Image (cartoon, rainbow, N blue to C red):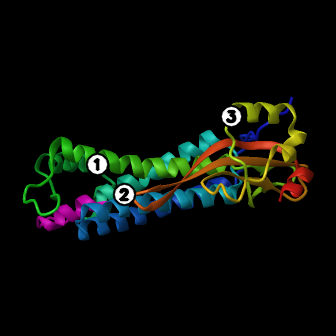
């Protein structure tokens, strides 16, 4: 029996490989650029944003490669994201340590370090013992366990973002009939907040044809709690996929904060019904 929700086919077309290799190759110069920025902008808070930017760039590159290659294998996509993240992470280590050595009057070259992982590990260990930068205006360099924590957070970002991006792309609905990705369409209407999520999901799973009747327009006066819907559609495919999120708007310290929680995601519906919703 077909699943009520979208399930990736697990297929990995051959054309994914060259796109992945190109992404992996791009991770190396990006790693050097990241290390250069970190070295020349010794401000911890800005460094954190740069780290997010580097991890995000690798994630976007992976998503573009998998999108082009029509990869529908979440496990292999995630492992590919991990591989690209590891390569970028190691490349930035080699480049950053090259800057450290150059600052000390030694310049073996970052490409030389890139080819010698044991040397990179040994140098990183030495830097950990002595420290290489300090927080704010403190003259004491960060080292030991505190530096390990900083490096650990950095590694989580640089490895995690490419993995997450790759998996999200591989689990995006794909039409095996049309050979195309489904396009996500956000519906402009606001629907009534779903209080009992479990009951809503159970009823929808048993009677999917009543989806339109189950969705009620939210009162205009209630702007703080409502639901937003979206559908994945693909021309030529008889199915579509429905998403519904609860949205809550609150005011904290004079600022508006919006939070979303998933009610149901990638639920399979008839394409004709999706057209009526849109």
N-terminal-most mark, 2 or 3: 2
Mark toward the viewer: 2 or 1: 1
Residue hosting label 3: 196
From the image, which quarter does the N terminus lie in?
Answer: top right
Q: Residue at x 87, y 59 (%)?
A: 235
Q: Which residues are magenta?
A: 95-108
Q: Above or below — where is 186 with respect to 261?
A: below
The residue tagged with tag 3: helix, strand or loop? loop
Mark toward the viewer: 3 or 1: 3
Q: Residue at x 36, y 64 (%)?
A: 50
Q: Residue at x 55, y 60 (%)?
A: 60
> Main structural element of the magenta stretch: helix, strand or loop?
helix
Q: Is residue 186 magenta?
A: no
Q: Position of residue 202 (x, y in %)?
A: 77, 30
Residue sitting nearer the eye, 7 or 188: 188
Number of marks? 3
Q: Is residue 104 magenta?
A: yes
Q: Position of residue 278 (x, y in %)?
A: 83, 59
Residue hosting label 2: 91
């Amino acid at each position: 029996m077909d699943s009520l929700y979208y399930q990736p086919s697990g297929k990995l077309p051959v054309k994914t490989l060259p796109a992945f290799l190109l992404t992996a190759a791009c991770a190396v110069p990006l790693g050097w650029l990241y290390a250069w920025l970190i070295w020349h902008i010794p401000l911890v808070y800005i460094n954190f944003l740069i780290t997010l930017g580097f991890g995000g760039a690798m994630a976007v590159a992976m998503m573009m490669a998998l999108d082009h290659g029509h990869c529908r294998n979440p496990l292999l996509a995630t492992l590919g994201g991990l591989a690209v993240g590891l390569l970028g992470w190691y490349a930035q280590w080699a480049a950053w340590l090259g800057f450290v050595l150059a600052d000390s009057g030694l310049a073996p070259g970052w490409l030389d370090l890139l080819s010698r992982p044991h040397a990179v590990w040994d140098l990183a260990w030495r830097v950990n013992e002595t420290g290489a930068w300090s927080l704010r205006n403190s003259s004491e360099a960060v080292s030991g366990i505190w530096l390990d924590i900083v490096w650990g957070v950095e590694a989580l970002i640089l490895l995690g973002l490419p993995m997450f991006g790759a998996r999200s792309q591989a689990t995006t609905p794909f039409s095996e009939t049309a050979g195309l990705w489904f396009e996500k369409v956000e519906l402009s209407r606001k629907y009534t907040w779903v209080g009992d999520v479990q009951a809503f999901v159970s009823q929808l799973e048993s009677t999917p044809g009543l989806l339109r009747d189950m969705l009620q327009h939210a009162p205009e006066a209630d702007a703080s709690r409502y639901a937003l819907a979206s559908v994945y559609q693909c021309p030529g495919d008889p199915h579509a996929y429905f998403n519904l999120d609860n949205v809550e708007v609150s005011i904290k310290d004079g600022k508006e904060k919006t939070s979303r929680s998933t009610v149901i995601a990638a639920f399979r519906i008839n394409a004709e019904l999706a057209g009526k919703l849109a």
